[in-house]
């Protein structure tokens, strides 16, 4: 494992947070946290969801004001009242949610960012500035394309570009690789290495241990608003960091893949997909002749970069999207022409990629969300009227069973954390004891404990004989839970590996198309 | 039609377009910043009234125009307090302000100006541009109009330039498209929205003033007669871009000029049907012909 970090962090602290505390009603988001950043280092800020990482960098960037504690820049105490102050102090921030305007071009977005930072430049000089920065850090960004037309990784480079254009001394990045495939994430880490080599101090927020070990010089671990430790990356290990992050929960990590689920090779597949093609809106076809099968008691993974067709494949099987040609058979029965509801009744459950928009209704309560698929069947309705008491009882049962952390069944789903929202989706979909489970990005954005819970539930379903198809961009996840992994690229399956002899690097190469030829 | 009657038709079309153009360009700016003004009609009506009243009191058409601007801005400010300060629904606020504007100007007409007939003010003189105005057919339409017609048409490239080529325009679009993102970039979202809204009020008031001070020379009850709504529609049909807005308005005003002339020539059609014509032509042509553009994402959304 070669590190891309710049080597020696040196010199005194460029920026120091001293005893910074921030409380929200009912939550102590940051509890007397100390942190220092040095020029030329990549400093990772590691912690689970809700550990206080975002609050801490929000304080550093002036999005919120600390209740107590000090921020020093080169030893002098400063107040950061907003992004403009932060920019003036040389602090740049690449947020998790992109701050570009999709309808404007890269150049226009850069002009806007510089203007917002109080450092406007003439519009004529914008393209040259982009070329220069793009060449210096290997960003490969074109000035004249609308940002909304760029790929996710392209959009992220625009964010980097905007941050770099104001010539910051400190750059904060919030989960920058969360939307990227392995190849793209790797490129991003190299760009970060180059920036640190250029003398920038980089604060990298992450919950990916491997990435942190690979790129950082030092790591600060937060847990429940408190700093647990700051360690030199060279003298720590994945195991130690994991333990620091989750504390006693570290034992949640299960022992890899379970005993190869008795593979009943003669049994007919529970789910089979034959020569499925989906025509694209304008460009190339989204799926091009995909065939695969999943047996009962098996978890099959779909690996691939975002946009390789995995999510679309899942959507076709779930009935959300219509195939141009090809067949889907569930238990030998063709699914063509069946509605989503009919497929649910045929034992197919779907955990959609975008849980907030496709999986849940944020303005409804937990118990209402849990009942959404039961409205026609009679479990939750009686002559069309809601059976509130039954809904509450059912919700309480599922909340307990899936360990959903929520005040009660009446809490609005939009107030839950990402992990608990996903547990609500999982609880609802799996409560009908489906025989076929389709999941897209099942642990996207979830922390370690929630991810483990989701994985454990999928494994249990497999043990009970469900056929599970999982799409993910996270190879570690697929390697951890799948029996077989199919690699997709450009709407085709380009390879299949049994997870017992697969490596992340090998699959990564397939995903990027290196061995596809 | 003879070439002289076509020429007269175009003269009418261009001068009918000017009030609409002011209001619609103002609304283009405001909607690009995410603020929708259903009360565009009301702001024109108030401008039309305060314009005539100001011209009366100060005995000056130009001060009348200034009062028209002030009237439009005043109504816009009420909308701003309701929506930008107290976060009222923009549509509801706009609808209510239209009703308020109609009532207030009808009352003001009786109390301040007396009868409809008795409030006439001198209108703007035409400024004939030598040589160019002698071009056959189109010359009189384009180069023999009052000054405020020229200004209205010159505003089209100006607004285009501001939106597409200045930092102010960029920030405006950012605010209308992704207010949170704009805010995190250091753009003062609330201030931008206020500015865009007040500019829109000023231009809509000017459009109302153009109607009475440059054209009719008097205020009558509900003198705008839905022109504000046409301007509002033109912004959508024009795809939130100044040149598109101009096209939509020219289509409407040409149809309007045509029906006015048809009435004058006493075609054997009830005049009520002729009066419907421009609205029908506009909605049909634009519904069928126009390539749809997406509205600013945060249009009408309070932040």
Image (cartoon, rainbow, N blue to C red):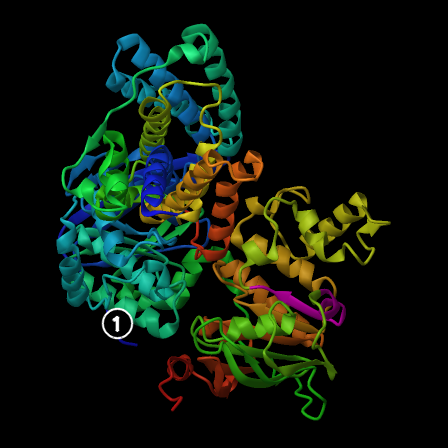
- Disc 1: host chain: A
The answer to if A344 sits in the magenta stretch is: yes
Measured as percent of width and height from the top left, residue A115 is found at 21, 44
Measured as percent of width and height from the top left, residue A340 is found at 69, 66
Give me the residue at 55% from left, 70% from top: A254
Q: Is residue A5 above or below residue B95?
A: below
Q: Is residue A398 left or right of residue B154?
A: right
The answer to if B225 sits in the magenta stretch is: no
Measured as percent of width and height from the top left, residue B120 is found at 36, 14
Give me the residue at 69% from left, 89% from top: A264
Residue A454 visible? The answer is yes
| Residue closest to the eye, A301 or A255 | A301
Give me the residue at 46% from left, 49% from top: A50
Q: What residue occupies the far right of the structure in this picture?
A: A383
| Residue closest to the eye, A429 or B53 | B53
Location of mark 1 (residue): A3
Stretch of the chain drawn in magenta: A341-352
Measured as percent of width and height from the top left, residue B157 is found at 24, 44
Q: Is residue A121 above or below residue A194?
A: above
The quarter of the displayed image where residue B33 is located: top left
Q: Is residue A154 above or below residue A481?
A: above
Q: Could you tell me how many numbered marks the image carries? A: 1
The quarter of the displayed image where residue A195 is located: bottom left
| Residue closest to the eye, A149 or A376 | A149
Q: Is residue B270 left or right of residue B288?
A: right
Q: Is residue A371 left or right of residue A258?
A: right
Residue A237 visible? The answer is no
Q: Quadrant of the C terminus of chain B?
A: top left
The quarter of the displayed image where residue A19 is located: top left
């Amino acid at each position: 494992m070669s590190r891309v970090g710049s080597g020696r962090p040196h010199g005194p602290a460029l920026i120091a947070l001293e005893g910074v505390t921030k409380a929200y009603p009912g939550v102590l988001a940051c509890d007397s946290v100390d942190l220092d950043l040095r020029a030329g280092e990549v400093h990772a800020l590691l912690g689970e969801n809700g550990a206080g990482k975002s609050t801490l960098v929000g304080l550093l960037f002036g999005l919120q004001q600390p209740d107590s504690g000090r921020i020093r820049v080169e030893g002098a105490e400063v107040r950061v009242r907003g992004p403009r102050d932060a920019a003036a102090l040389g602090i740049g921030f690449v947020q998790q949610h992109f701050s570009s305007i999709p309808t404007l071009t890269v150049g226009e977005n850069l002009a806007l960012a510089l203007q917002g930072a109080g450092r406007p430049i003439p519009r004529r000089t914008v393209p040259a500035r982009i070329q220069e920065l793009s060449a210096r850090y290997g960003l490969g960004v074109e000035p004249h394309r609308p940002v909304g037309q760029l790929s996710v990784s392209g959009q992220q480079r625009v964010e980097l570009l905007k941050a770099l254009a104001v010539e910051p001394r400190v750059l904060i990045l919030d989960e920058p690789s969360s939307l990227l495939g392995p190849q793209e994430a790797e490129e991003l880490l190299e760009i970060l290495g180059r920036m640190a080599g250029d003398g920038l101090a980089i604060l990298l927020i992450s919950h990916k241990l491997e990435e942190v070990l690979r790129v950082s010089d030092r790591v600060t671990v937060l847990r429940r608003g408190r700093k647990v430790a700051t360690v030199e990356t060279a003298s720590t290990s994945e195991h130690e960091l994991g333990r620091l992050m989750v504390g006693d929960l570290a034992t949640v990590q299960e022992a890899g893949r379970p005993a190869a689920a008795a593979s009943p090779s003669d049994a007919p597949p529970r789910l089979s997909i034959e020569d499925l093609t989906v025509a694209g809106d304008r460009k190339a076809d989204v799926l091009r002749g995909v065939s695969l099968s999943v047996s009962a008691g098996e978890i099959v993974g779909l690996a691939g970069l975002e946009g390789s067709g995995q999510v679309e494949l899942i959507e076709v099987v779930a009935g959300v999207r219509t195939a141009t040609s090809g067949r889907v058979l569930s238990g030998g029965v063709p699914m063509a022409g069946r509605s989503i509801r009919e497929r649910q009744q045929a034992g197919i459950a779907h955990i959609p990629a975008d849980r907030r928009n496709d999986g849940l209704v944020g303005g409804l309560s937990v118990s209402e969300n849990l009942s959404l698929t039961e409205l026609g069947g009679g479990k939750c309705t009686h002559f069309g009227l809601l059976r509130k008491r039954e809904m509450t009882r059912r919700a309480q049962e599922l909340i307990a069973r899936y360990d959903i952390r929520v005040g009660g069944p009446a809490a609005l789903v939009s107030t839950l954390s990402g992990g608990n929202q996903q547990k609500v989706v999982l609880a609802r979909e799996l409560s009908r004891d489906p025989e076929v489970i389709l999941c897209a990005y099942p642990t996207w954005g979830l922390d370690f404990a929630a991810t483990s819970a989701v994985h454990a539930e999928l494994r249990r379903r497999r043990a009970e004989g469900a056929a599970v198809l999982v799409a993910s961009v996270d190879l570690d996840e697929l390697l951890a839970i799948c029996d077989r992994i199919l690699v997709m690229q450009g709407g085709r399956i380009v390879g299949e590996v049994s997870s017992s002899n697969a490596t992340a690097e090998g699959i990564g190469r397939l995903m990027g198309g290196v061995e596809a030829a | 039609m003879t070439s002289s009657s076509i020429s007269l038709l175009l003269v009418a079309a261009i001068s009918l377009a000017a009030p609409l153009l002011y209001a619609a360009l103002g609304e283009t700016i405001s909607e690009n910043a995410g603020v929708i003004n259903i009360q565009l009609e009301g702001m024109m009506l108030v401008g039309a009234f305060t314009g005539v009243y100001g011209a009366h009191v100060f005995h000056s058409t130009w001060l009348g125009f200034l009062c028209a601007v002030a009237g439009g801005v005043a109504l816009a400010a009420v909308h701003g307090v309701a929506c930008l300060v107290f976060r009222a629904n923009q549509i509801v606020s706009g609808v209510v302000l239209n009703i308020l504007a109609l009532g207030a100007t009808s009352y003001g007409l009786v109390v301040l100006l007396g009868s409809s007939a008795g409030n006439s003010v001198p209108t703007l003189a035409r400024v004939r541009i030598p040589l160019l105005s002698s071009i056959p057919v189109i010359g009189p339409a384009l180069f023999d109009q009052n000054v405020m017609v020229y200004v209205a048409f010159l505003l089209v490239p100006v607004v285009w330039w501001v939106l597409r080529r200045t930092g102010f325009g960029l920030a405006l679009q950012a605010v209308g498209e992704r207010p949170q993102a704009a805010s995190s970039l250091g753009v003062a979202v609330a201030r931008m929205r206020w500015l865009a809204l007040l500019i829109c009020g000023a231009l809509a008031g000017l459009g109302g003033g153009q109607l009475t001070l440059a054209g009719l020379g008097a205020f009558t009850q509900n003198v705008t007669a839905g022109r504000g709504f046409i301007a509002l529609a033109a912004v959508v049909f024009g795809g939130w871009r100044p040149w598109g807005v101009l096209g939509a308005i020219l289509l409407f005003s040409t149809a309007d000029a045509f029906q006015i002339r048809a009435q004058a020539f006493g075609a054997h059609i009830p005049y009520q049907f002729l009066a419907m014509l421009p609205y029908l032509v506009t909605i049909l042509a634009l519904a069928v012909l126009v390539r749809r553009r997406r509205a600013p994402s945060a249009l009408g959304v309070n932040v």
